[in-house]
Amino acid sequence: MTEDEIRRRPGGRGARVRRAVLDAAVDALVENGVTKFSFADVAARAEVNETSVYRRWRTRENLITDALLAVSDRQVPIPDTGSVREDLYLFAASVVGYLNSPLGRALARAAVITVEDTELAAAREAFWQSRIQLAATMVERGIDRGELRPGVNPRVALEALIAPLHSRVLLTREPLDDDLPRILADLVMDGLGTP
């Protein structure tokens, strides 16, 4: 069986190897940060051959982006309750839970480290763009259902919802209280207005 066939088998060896590598990449990011991140370290942690990691991801930036996306997909899913207000609240609550964890705090810090490496900067941008595009569906569904006026900018709405959370974790080091997600979701909804 070829490596491509293994990779295509859902739940097969390829899926297990991918999960092991992504988990190892997250561990490496948390422990060492972006600047010391390497294929060799990730491969050793995942107990796979370094060439297998390189063959699948090609660059460390691709691996960093994929690892951050995988962990954020698991930790911060995109809700679909039928109410944009409730979706925004649940999304913000998931972000709070994630950022309150040691893993979430470490990855948030890793995601904003300033580096001179243009490829790392591009990987970070790809990560944020992907997450914003996924989360934008909450706002787009709200527009489609008539809960929000047409023309609402999903990115700006999400930034208004999430930026205060990241600001507290990364800048002011204030706690993320349990009532903050509801307050922010209501603030965003009130600011966006209804049709």
Image (cartoon, rainbow, N blue to C red):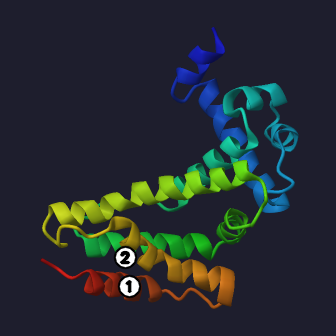
Residue depicted at 53% across the width and 76% down the height: 96
SS for callout 1: helix
Please name the amino acid that badge 2 sits on.
Answer: Tyr
Quadrant in the rendering for residue 176: bottom right
Q: Which residue is mark 2?
A: 89
**Left or right position of 65 against 191:** right
- Residue farthest to the top, as pictured: 1
The C terminus is located in which quarter? bottom left
In the displayed structure, would residue 101 be above or below residue 131?
below
Residue depicted at 62% across the width and 77% down the height: 100
Q: Residues within 10 Å of mark 2 (few under 14, many from 20)?
A: many
Q: Which residue is mark 1?
A: 182
Closer to the camera in the image, 97 or 185: 185
Please name the amino acid that badge 1 sits on.
Answer: Arg
SS for callout 2: helix
In the displayed structure, would residue 105 be above or below residue 55?
below
Q: Percent x, y for residue 84?
A: 26, 70
CA distance separating discs 1 and 2 = 5 Å
Quadrant in the rendering for residue 109: bottom right
The N terminus is located in which quarter? top right
Q: Residues within 10 Å of mark 1 (few under 14, many from 20)?
A: some
Q: Earlier in the sequence, mark 1 or mark 2?
A: 2
Q: Percent x, y for residue 163?
A: 51, 78
Number of residue marks: 2
Q: Percent x, y for residue 144?
A: 16, 60
**Left or right position of 39 against 74:** right
